[in-house]
Amino acid sequence: MPESSKPAQSNVVTVSQLNRQARVTIEQRFNQVWVTGELSNFARPRSGHWYFTLKDDKAQVRCAMFVNRNRAVQMQPSDGQQVLIRGKVSLYEGRGDFQIIVEQMEPAGEGALRQAFDALKLKLAAEGLFATEHKLPLPHQPTSAVVVSSASGAALQDVLAVWRRRYPRLRVTLIPTAVQGNEAEPQILHALAQAQRLAPDVILLTRGGGSLEDLWCFNLESVARAIYELRIPVVAAIGHEIDVTIADFVADVRAPTPSAAAEIIVPNTQDMLDSLAATFRQLRSVMQYTLQQQNFQLRNSALRLVSPKTHIQQNWQRLDEQRRRFSAAMQLRLLDDSNQVVRTRARLSALGPSHRLQLARQGVGTLHQKLHARWQQTLQLHHNKLANLARMLESVSPLPTLSRGYAIVRDPNGKVLENTKDVQLGEQITAQLAMGAITANVTHIDADASLQPVTKEPDHASDHE
């Protein structure tokens, strides 16, 4: 062999390395696959693992399903069965065998349903219908429950038997419905809507076990969304423990069996009674201990207490003593006050106002005489002044002149006439006399007439006398 045709040392691998690289490459390329075919060469060694060949009319492939996975298979595999498997393509490095590590197996007829189940599960999970924050908590002590199930199914009888045993006070309403077949979907939707209107504390959706096709009505999108829209806690118990449906994921609580669901929904009355009895015993023990402590404290307090009769007698004695002291003090105080009054009266007599009052009375008499004389003097002085003023007024008053027959003449405007030039013929004038006034019209004016003395008529009465 020519020297140049030899491979480089770094490019040479061992068989183990080659198989390992091939396994990694295959697993990366074929992560998850669904494969259908016929079972053959099925083997179940003591380890519990399953080894078999899956073939069709043109090819075959080795398969291995380990015990932690094959426990969930609901069928009993045997040679010649048509099955649908889901798994991961790999390579067994020890022999270099191409194989499938199987994770799920079911009869081939259920393959389409399983694919539809997985697709809907992914869709609803992405929308948040399975989210924990949307789950409603179950009531601790429900008073009413609605069961949506078949009226003739064993699941209903199991649930009722558990409730009669554990919690007989629960008020149960059954809404019967078909749980498989074409009529199941509309009946389940109607039953859920009716359960919402009844407004119970909890809703139980349940049925017994069956194949994937039998349980398919609980994998429908319409049923899942109806459960999600309920505002009442929903417990789903569909089939056996290994059965899982879309309704289980959407429900607020999933129970593995109908009986388990019944136990989840209600508390155990006997457990409650036992707990109540234990609480009562604890309370009684605490009360007894508290009463003992209080009785002990009461006895100790009673030993320290003095009889009320003794206190009353002592208080009576104190009251009598205080009364005697008060009486003696009052008598002494009255005696002191009497002496003080006598002494004060003597001082008041010595300093009494009688002499001063006598002197004051004499002074007042003198002042009264002086005041009377001064008042008489002042009154006489004012009388004299008044007489003088009267004479002065008499001298300037027109009344004496008027009384001698004269008159004061005024024009229509009230102005005193002094000259004939101040009046016109026909004007109306007024003459003020000593007794009354006369109004006259001017018919004649004599500017040259002189004043004649007025001769007073003799008083006939005087002449007669």
Image (cartoon, grey):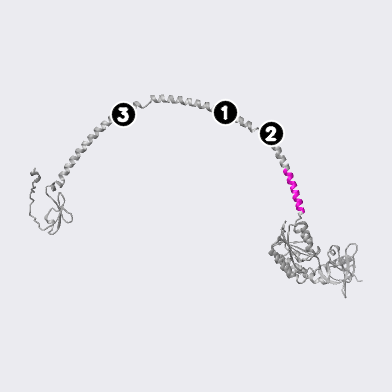
Q: Quadrant of the N terminus?
A: bottom right
**Residue position for label 2:** 303
**In the image, residue 82 above or below residue 341:** below
In depth, the one of 10 and 294 nearer the eye is 294
Q: Position of residue 392 (x, y in %)?
A: 16, 42
Mark 2 element type: helix
Q: Name the element at disc 1.
A: helix
Instruction: Give yes or no for contact between labels 1 and 2 (Cβ–Cβ under 8 Å).
Output: no
Is mark 1 in CB contact (under 8 Å) with mark 3?
Answer: no
Quarter of the image for the C terminus: give it.
Answer: top left
Q: Crowding near pointer 2: few (<14 within 10 Å), some, many (20+)?
A: few
Q: Residue at x 69, y 63 (%)?
A: 198
Query: Which residue sits furthest right?
Result: 1
Residue designated by label 3: 361
Name which residue type carries label 1.
Answer: Asp
Question: Among all residues in the image, which is located at the extreme front?
Answer: 464
Residue 97, by quadrant, is: bottom right
Q: Where does the image place residue 142, in percent across and percent down from the top left?
A: 72, 58
Alpha carbons under labels 3 and 2: distance apart: 86 Å
Where residue 143 appears, as percent x and y from the top left, is 71, 58
Q: Position of residue 331 (x, y in %)?
A: 50, 26
Q: Secondary structure at mark 3?
A: helix
Eye-nearest disc, 3 or 2: 2
Q: Residues within 10 Å of mark 1 (few under 14, many from 20)?
A: few
Mark earlier in primary sequence (1, 3): 1
Look at mark 1 in the image and give the residue it sits on: 320
Q: Report, in whole angstroms, how far the alpha carbon at label 1 lies from the one at label 2.
A: 29 Å
Q: Nearer the viewer, mark 1 or mark 3?
A: 1
Q: Is residue 225 visible?
A: no
Q: CA distance from mark 1 to mark 3?
A: 60 Å
